[in-house]
Image (tube, grey):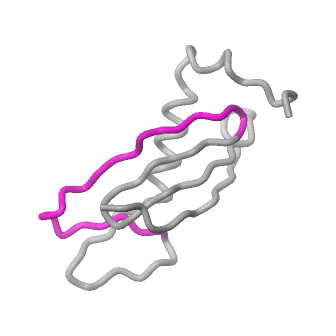
Amino acid sequence: MPFTKEHDLSFEFDGYTIEATIVYSQKDYMIKVRKPTYVELPGRHIMHMLPVVYAMPNESVPTQYQRVNLLADVKKDIERYFSKPENYPDFDEDSE
């Protein structure tokens, strides 16, 4: 399924400001982190036969689908990535 929407996101984590763009559809998403270092995270996929869709908190979802809070899942994915010690050497907020 093609990605059809984008959502910019900014939050604090472990002393760093995280800035990212979520590119998503109802069944797929990927994450493009811009700050503190550029990285593309693969996101996840929901099988089409399941009556579940990714949605932002303010988006409406058809009643036949169960909602997965996309914003919460993305934050967890980003935090998980930046919690790994091997990803810390790439941090350089002064490189802009």
- Identity of the residue drawn at 18% across and 56% down: 47
Q: Position of residue 59 (x, y in %)?
A: 46, 78
Q: Is residue 27 left or right of residue 84?
A: left
Q: Quadrant of residue 42?
A: top left
Percent x, y for residue 93? 81, 30
Q: Position of residue 63 (x, y in %)?
A: 25, 85
Dominant SS in magenta = loop
Q: Is residue 60 above or below residue 66?
A: below
Q: Residue at x 18, y 70 (%)?
A: 51
Task: Using residue 77 as the reference point, say whether residue 27 is left or right of it.
Answer: left
Residue 24 placed where, x, y %? Answer: 44, 60
67 up-or-down from 27: above or below: below
- Identified at 18% across, 63% down, the residue is 48
Q: Which residues are magenta?
A: 35-56
Q: Quadrant of the C terminus?
A: top right
Residue drawn at x 55%, y 26% as measured from the top left? 83
Q: Nearer the viewer, residue 6 or 79?
A: 6
